[in-house]
Image: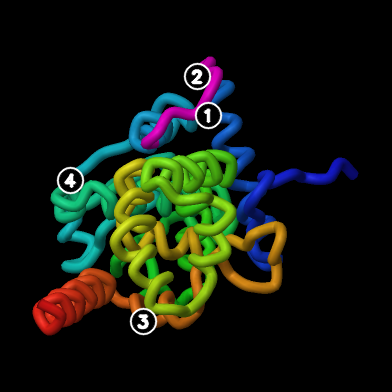
Amino acid sequence: MREFRYGKIFEPSSGLRMMERKARRCLSYCRHHLGLKRVPLPIPIEQWIEQAMDIRFGVEDLSHLGADVLGAAFIRDREILISDKALPNDGRFRFTCAHELGHFVLHAKLADAFQETVEPGFASTRRIERQADRFAAAFLMPIPLWEREVVSIADDAKLDPEWLLPELMMPTLKSEELWQSLVVPQICRRFGVSRIAALIRARGLRLMSDAQRPFLPARFYHAWASPGAFAAAELRRRASGARQHEEMS
């Protein structure tokens, strides 16, 4: 059996490799079906759902399915619907689209329909929802492009990637500052994803040179594990920095 290569710098954690392969194959299918030489960023998920995967796609009021429903995948009807409530947050909207596509790819034999009643991400407790989250993260942020962009982020910030990558794995104040002020904002902008999606992806990756530890330290992941927690932590960090600056003045 031919060995499946993930990247040159990063690889998924051992429990996520099957999900990674399925997302990569789906991504490759879309690219070849549309005759593209390379994958564009941000990945045009809505268009690819319709044009490459031949799944009907729409945005509408889904309150008739439940007050908190953000998205739904109808397997038998080959249709994905996203709630208009998700539109104001483009990152969340795109992640929800990819999450519902994940149900088509991963779970088509398990049920005729799936409904998302919470924001995809940390709140998911059901196994199939976590799988769809991980598929979405891998589809929107494929490892080769993640590697390219992380190195580019370091270069743009005049930082040595060989210093930055190991530093980001350390549960230190410096690492926390780099994640909050540099890496996560840039990943969100370049891939068109939400903070939660970026954190899910970072948590599921390992450096090939240090595969025993997650790229994103567990302490940060759990501290930022609810919607709004990352932004609140960033505000606290900035406030602390401002106080220290005043004390030194």
Which part of the image, by quadrant, shows the N terminus? top right
Three-letter amino acid code at disc 2? Leu
Tell me if label 4 and label 1 are in contact, CB under 8 Å. no
Question: Which of the two marks, 4 or 1, is nearer to us in this view?
Answer: 1
Q: CA distance from mark 1 to mark 2?
A: 6 Å
Tell me if label 3 and label 1 are in contact, CB under 8 Å. no
Q: CA distance from mark 2 to mark 4?
A: 27 Å
Q: Tell me the residue at 67%/67% (across/down).
A: 15
- Residue 239 lies in magenta, yes or no? no
Three-letter amino acid code at disc 1? Cys
Q: Tell me the residue at 30%/54% (across/down).
A: 185
Which residue is denoted by mark 2 in the rendering?
A: 34
Which residue is denoted by mark 1 in the rendering?
A: 30
State left or right for residue 20 relative to residue 94. Answer: right
Magenta extent:
34-42
Which residue is denoted by mark 4 in the rendering?
A: 60
Point out the tag, 2 or 3, that comes first from the N-terminus: 2
- Residue 38 lies in magenta, yes or no? yes
